[in-house]
Image (cartoon, helix red, strand yellow):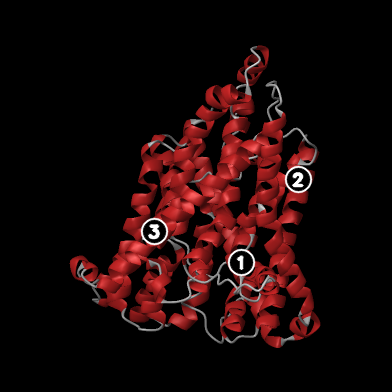
Amino acid sequence: MLAPADRRLRRALGLAGGLVAFGFLAGALLAVPLVTGLWPAAPLALLQDPYLRGIVAFTLEQAALSALLSLALGIPLGLALHRTRLPGRAFVLRLFLVPQALPPLVGALGLLAVFGRGGWLGDAFALAGLPRPSIYGLAGILLAHVFFNAALVARLVYGALGAVPHESWRIAGQLGLSPLAVLRHVEGPAVLRALPQAASLVFALCVTSFTLVLVLGGGPAATTVEVAVYQALRYDFDPGRALALALLQIGLVALALAPLLMIGGSTADLGLGHAGAARRFDRPSRGRTVLDGFVIALGLALLLCPLAALVANGLAADLGRLVGDPAVARAALTSLLVAVPAALLGLGLSLALALAAAGGGTFARLAAGGASALVLVVPPIVVGAGWFLLLRGTGDVARLAPVVVVVAQAVLILPYGVRLFLPAIVEADRRHGRLALGLGLTGWARLRHLEGPALRRPASLALGLALAVSLGDLSTVALFGSTDFTTLPLLLLQRMGSYRSADAAGLALLLGLGVLAVLLAAEVSGRQRGETRA
């Protein structure tokens, strides 16, 4: 329940937040032709180029195959996690959040350490007298996308199963339904409801994958549209072609997300929900238990082996020298100077959009949801391309690059922030909204005494996640990096490019541990705040 003044204020917040997100994400691309006089190449002429047609075809092919493989592993994994009654399920669920927080470049190095020619699997093949496998190309891209997205699908499926009414599980137990009948009548419908969202979201994430394709693509035959945008500006400097490719990329992602938007799904739900573990009454089955154990073991092996290899290779590097390296210290300081303001700005925008979505009316909800969806529709490298072209025609790119990167990373975390803030705001209003209205709490007083306590834990989690995303991000800084503006992910990429593999392994370990430490501290702080409030 909201007073009229609060409702008007939240409408204004939703409109302002939506305009900021839209203005930054799409404004640069729309303003480039007007400010610089640069117009994109004709779409038909662009698609007549066999090489560019091949890029578009490969982009769609790898995204479709990645989505199918992620679903093929993620759905059984989500089912197995929900069925298991063994202790440690909560810990395993937390482990499957790691790929969502791990910087893509760090994850790629972990996969190379296991599946690359010089990795653990390559050594095993050599001992067996077999040729060493190559992870570069389509196979490596698919493997990396499954590593990052199968856990996301599993959490979405687990959340859908957690939303099944308790009565359904109780009836299944009372009727003595077989495992196959439970799958058909209870689990299956829940999974089918989550399937369009999971498939559309993973497909869109794979279409917009930049870092993994840049590192594991291995050449022109395995290049996506987003990497082609980067190459057109960074190496060929063909602005017209880059702008046309950027618009093409937006169209591809919009088509990928169209099914999700048409069925009313939420692009803000990125598997961050903590669905309660429903008590199941269906009878256990020895065969199903064995199969579920195998699926969970497979998922854990895919997750833990690259992480273990990353730790082993990182510890073998000269960490003391790396920590004392002035270049590493400057890159770490730059990363912090970018991540902290980006996280704070992103959380401010997320809070404004969440407040608007919770009580600002239909238009405010559309603005909040649209701003979150737009982050996925307009990928970071495309945003960077637009601002790079715009700043090049109107100002000093090097001087304004840090500001652009900060705002880009702030907007990048909107889906996470809105997803974490919105349920807490809605629940606080449901429980105490009428009382607050009766006491005359409005404006800042209402936010302080009603929403404030409810937002303490999600704010801690959102801050940790925002810092982790910003610290590990490469896509927003890829075009603007220079000798004077280098973050840790960019420095890591440079060390990889110069074949300094030991340094790259050490930097990957330091960056990965730093990001995970931030997330762990945020979760502990959030839990303590939640307990204090309770």
- Above or below residue 295? Residue 45 is below
**Which secondary structure, mark 2?**
helix
Label annotation for residue 164:
none
Identify which residue, 33 or 92, lies in the foreground: 92
Looking at the rendered structure, the kind of residue marked 1 is: Gly
Circle 1/circle 2 CB separation < 8 Å: no
- Give the amino acid type for the residue marked by disc 2 in the picture: Phe
Q: Earlier in the sequence, mark 2 or mark 3?
A: 3
Residue carrying label 2: 91
Q: Earlier in the sequence, mark 3 or mark 1?
A: 3
Front position in the image: 10 or 325: 325
Residue ID for mark 1 = 472
Q: CA distance from mark 2 to mark 3?
A: 35 Å
- Which callout, 1 or 2, points at the residue further toward the start of the chain? 2
Q: Provide the residue designation for mark 3.
A: 61
Q: Using the rendered view, name the quadrant where residue 451 is placed.
A: top right
- Mark 3 and mark 1 in contact? Answer it, CB < 8 Å: no
Residue type (three-letter) at the residue carrying disc 3: Glu
